[in-house]
Amino acid sequence: MEEKKIDQTEEHLDPRDHRVLGRELDLFTFSDTVGKGLPLWTPRGATFRRELEKFVVETEIEWGYQHVYTPDIAKIDLYKKSGHYPYYKDTMYAPIQIDEEEFMLRPMTCPHHFELFLSKPRSYKELPMRIAEIAKLYRYELSGVLSGLTRVRSFCLADAHIICADEDQAKTEIAHAIDLIEYMAGVFGLKMGKDFSYRLSLGDRNDKKKYFDDDKSWDKSEGILREVLNERKSKFVEAEGEAAFYGPKIDIQMKKINGVEETAFTVQYDFVMPTRFDLKFTASDGTEKLPLVIHRSSIGAIERIAAFLLEHFNGALPLWLSPYQVAVLPISEKTLEYSEKIVKELKAQGIRVELNTEADSLGKKIRNAEASKVPYMLIIGEKEVKSEQVSVRARGQKDLGAMTLADFAKKIIKEDKEKSL
Ligand SMILES: [Zn+2]
């Protein structure tokens, strides 16, 4: 019922709203039978998402992260051990009974990564250890607040936990995490101050129920985060009572097209979990020490950043993120065979290309390709077949003239590699 209501009101939505773009560009859909807040990605949307995820994983590995896979469910005891359970109980789904044990759909990745750390004895030489994962998470949201890809019940977080030997290392790692966030934002063409900003989210010493009771550690860790931001001369605002229960955080606030600001992702300082999980390592002097943990996300939830980017680019995604990069438009059936050959050659070079085989007029094919926001069109008439060339048209009515297929492919591969905007 709720889902139908959304459909009816969709005509009142901003045409740049990702829910409208998602339907028009055939990127994702919802089914009441599958359930509310559980997006289904179409092949086109899945390609966009896969390229996003590939970028995150490859970049993070380059930046020294180690990517892992851990399961979507875990025994309830894990969340009792982490202390998440009492704080997150209301946002977790009911336990699943398997044999004699109770399991939970995971609302966060941290405890899984800590158990990985604990799988063997650790030395200071392995630190900082940056454990990362594109992790599927599940959180309960009231059906009334579910909205497109921004408020969902199942999402994928570009998550990581950095195990640090001491405060100095933690400070360096927080700065390193922010450098990575700024680098990635730069690749998307997002500008600090305009598209995103920093917020230092603090605890509340009077609220011992919401926040772990350790005034000294709160003072110290809040000071460290403030110092990192000040040292890099980043502008930020401070917000009391917005921290995680285990420590303060730097929130990356994204400004949406409607002007609304929302926390897209965070870098958090944690002085609680290392003790709870007994995450020991052997220090250089041979003694056993407790590390510090940084929780961070580089681009936040894949669903949320996908929605943000769709709105930011008004659906005209950069070539490297586009579901299809090239549309081949044969003028008539006579040029179909040559068009098919072109598609085959481009595909062999890893270019995402689709062939329009409809019997429509060229004008209609171009209009449809423009509407699908594909970055390039190749118009194939008899002239092109004879000269063994392609006529290139860029998104937004720009005629780039004729060129050889090899030159065109080179241009696409270069743009894709450089992630040009
Ligand atoms: Zn975490």
Image (cartoon, grey):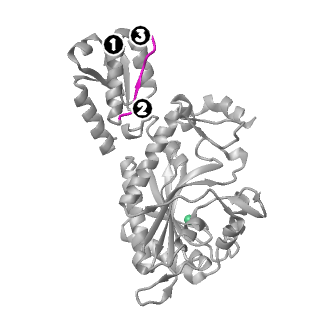
The image shows residue 289 at horizontal and vertical percentages of 50, 85
Q: Where is mark 3, residue-wise? A: 361
Q: Is residue 333 left or right of residue 98?
A: left
The image quarter in which residue 175 lies? bottom left
Q: Earlier in the sequence, mark 3 or mark 1?
A: 1
Q: Is residue 83 above or below residue 323?
A: below
Secondary structure at badge 1 equals: helix
Q: Earlier in the sequence, mark 3 or mark 2?
A: 2
Q: Is mark 1 within 8 Å of ligand 1?
A: no
The image quarter in which residue 205 lies? bottom right
Mark 3 crowdedness (10 Å alpha carbons): few <14, some 14-19, many ≥20: few
Identity, as a three-letter code, of the amino acid under mark 2: Tyr
Query: What residue range appears in magenta?
Result: 351-359
Residue at the spot x=35%, y=34% of the render? 351
Ligand 1 shown in quarter:
bottom right
Identity, as a three-letter code, of the amino acid under mark 3: Ser
Identity, as a three-letter code, of the amino acid under mark 1: Thr
Q: Is residue 120 above or below residue 359?
A: below
Task: Give the alpha-carbon distance from disc 3 to disc 2, as whole Å.
Answer: 21 Å
Q: Earlier in the sequence, mark 1 or mark 2?
A: 2
Q: Where is mark 1, residue-wise? A: 335
Query: Which quadrant would the N terminus be assigned to in this image?
Result: top right
Residue 229 in view of the camera: no
Secondary structure at badge 2 equals: loop
Nearest the eye: 207 or 289: 289
Q: Which mark is residue 324?
A: 2
Mainly helix, strand or loop, the magenta region? loop
